[in-house]
Image (cartoon, rainbow, N blue to C red):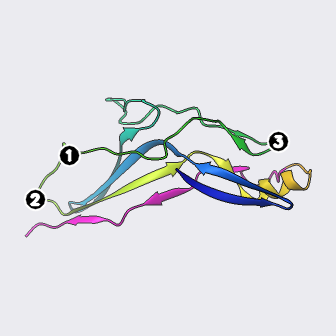
């Protein structure tokens, strides 16, 4: 399980990094027009991809804005799956990449507000969802 370290002045707080509900595959093909499609292919917490929407249900992760604590035991430190594109067409140039989101966490400015006993700024979101993505895999026609 990954961790990030937050320095709250005299107190050091370790926060586990947990993945939000899904591994997402992003496919874009170039059949004369760019056509992006985002598909959830693995869900955390034993949840299943909805066959109609191709999305994972909300895993219920939340942030307490008063102290920046997060919902315990929600998300996954690791997700794995096998996936095969049901719409693969070897006659179209395309690329694929994997995208994941972390559970929501406090934005740095919210951490500052909590540390200083102030209300978070109202002109920006108080939470964020960090994301990571892979290098693209290109499929080119001959």
Question: Spatial distance from mark 2 to mark 1, Cα to Cα?
Answer: 17 Å
In the image: residue 89, left or right of residue 64: left
- Name which of mark 3 and mark 2 comes first in the sequence: 3
User: Can you see residue 5?
Assistant: yes
Residue occupied by mark 1 = 84
- Name which of mark 1 and mark 3 comes first in the sequence: 3
At a point 11% along the width and 57% down the height, the residue shown is 90
Q: Secondary structure at mark 1?
A: loop
**Residue 120 in the image: x percent, y percent?**
83, 51
* Image: magenta residue range: 120-142
At a point 65% along the width and 37% down the height, the residue shown is 62
Residue occupied by mark 3 = 66
Magenta span contains residue 125: yes
Residue 53, by quadrant, is: top left
Magenta span contains residue 130: yes
Q: Nearer the viewer, residue 46 or 141?
A: 46
At a point 78% along the width and 55% down the height, the residue shown is 111
**Residue 35 in the image: x percent, y percent?**
30, 55
Question: Spatial distance from mark 1 to mark 3, Cα to Cα?
Answer: 43 Å
Give the numbered dot on residue 91. Answer: 2
In the image: residue 99, left or right of residue 41: right
Q: Nearer the viewer, residue 142 or 67?
A: 67
């Amino acid at each position: 399980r990954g961790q990030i370290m937050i320095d709250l002045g005299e107190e050091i707080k370790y926060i586990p990094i947990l993945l939000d509900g899904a591994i997402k595959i992003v496919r874009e093909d170039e059949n004369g027009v760019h056509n992006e499609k985002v598909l959830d292919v693995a869900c955390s917490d034993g949840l299943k991809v909805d066959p109609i929407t191709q999305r994972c249900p909300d895993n219920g992760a939340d942030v307490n804005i008063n102290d920046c604590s997060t919902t315990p035991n929600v998300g996954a430190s690791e997700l794995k799956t096998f996936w095969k594109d049901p719409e693969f067409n070897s006659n179209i140039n395309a690329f694929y990449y994997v995208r994941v989101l972390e559970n929501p966490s406090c934005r740095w400015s919210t951490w500052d507000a909590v540390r200083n006993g102030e209300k978070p700024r109202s002109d920006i979101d108080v939470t964020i969802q960090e994301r990571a993505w892979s290098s693209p895999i290109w499929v080119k026609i001959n």
